[in-house]
Amino acid sequence: MSIIIILFILIGLSLRHVTYRPSTLWGLTLWGFLHMAGGGLSWNGHRWYEIMFYTFSESYRILKYDQVIHFIGFLVATLVVWDLLRPHLTHPPKGHIALGITVVMAGLGLGALNEIVEFSVSIATPHNGVGDLTNMGLDLISNLLGALTAWIIILAREKRALQQPHTPHRQDNTRRTRKNKSTYALLTSITVLSAALFLATLTPATNILGSATYFTQDGNLATTTPGAPFLQK
């Protein structure tokens, strides 16, 4: 959560000078919402973060809710890095390989900062659910896949932008429209994240999502059943 807060503060401070894509801000909102839901809500007595979407291996806990959130989160974080960097580049940007390495590594740097925060939490707070070194390694791999996917999206956007005619007047209007949308998206994002925080305190509800697989505390696989309580304080 700390990285999400840092990114929101960074965006808020730089909004007058940087034109963020609204899709980047919506992605940041989605990340924050799913992150808080994963930590604040439980399914059949287990946090959403412990749920297995698919069991690729019993030795390595893949594919967990946590890993999907890391993928989404640092895909979005890498897009934020690009929006910050883009105004300082030529049009079109040159040196895609070097630029791609720089942007992806910046996204991974934010991921590493997140792991440092989690490590600090694990030292200061017992029974924090942060996980072991294997969990950290799988998180970092998820971060890498998310950052690489973000760079593929960025390249596709830049290629599409080159195919569209650009005039100074059109560029000014496009920039102004995007800045207005960015401001609206930022304010709405804060509202949605506040609602997500409230959602994490809801009273018990009914499992409407069907069955799910998760790891129990003794390391065994278990499966929920449809209709079982899953929203608990």
Image (cartoon, rainbow, N blue to C red):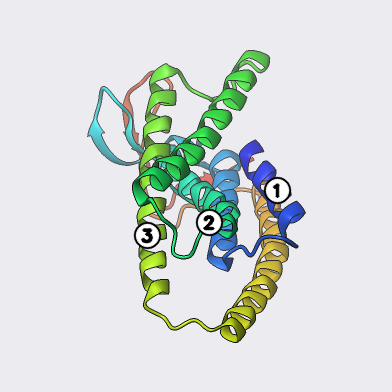
Q: Which residue is mark 2?
A: 89
Residue that numbered label 3 is attached to: 155
Left or right: residue 38 versus residue 176 is left
Mark pair 3, 2: CA separation: 14 Å
- In percent of width and height, residue 51 lies at 41, 39
Q: Residue 10 shows which numbered tag?
A: 1
Nearer the observer: mark 2 or 1; the answer is: 2
Residue 31 in percent (x, y) is at 54, 51
Instruction: Residue 155: name its quadrant.
Output: bottom left
Distance, label 2 to label 1, CA atoms, is 20 Å
Tell whether 180 sits left or right of 40: right
Q: How packed is label 2: few (under 14 Cα within 10 Å), some, or many (20 or more)? A: few
Q: Are the residues at dot 3 and dot 2 in contact (C-beta closer than 8 Å)?
A: no
First-in-chain label (3 vs 1):
1
Q: Amino acid at mark 3?
A: Leu
Query: Please, what is the three-letter code of the amino acid marked with disc 2?
Result: Leu
Q: Residue at x 58, y 79 (%)?
A: 171
Amino acid beneath label 1? Leu
Label 3 vs 2, first from the N-terminus: 2
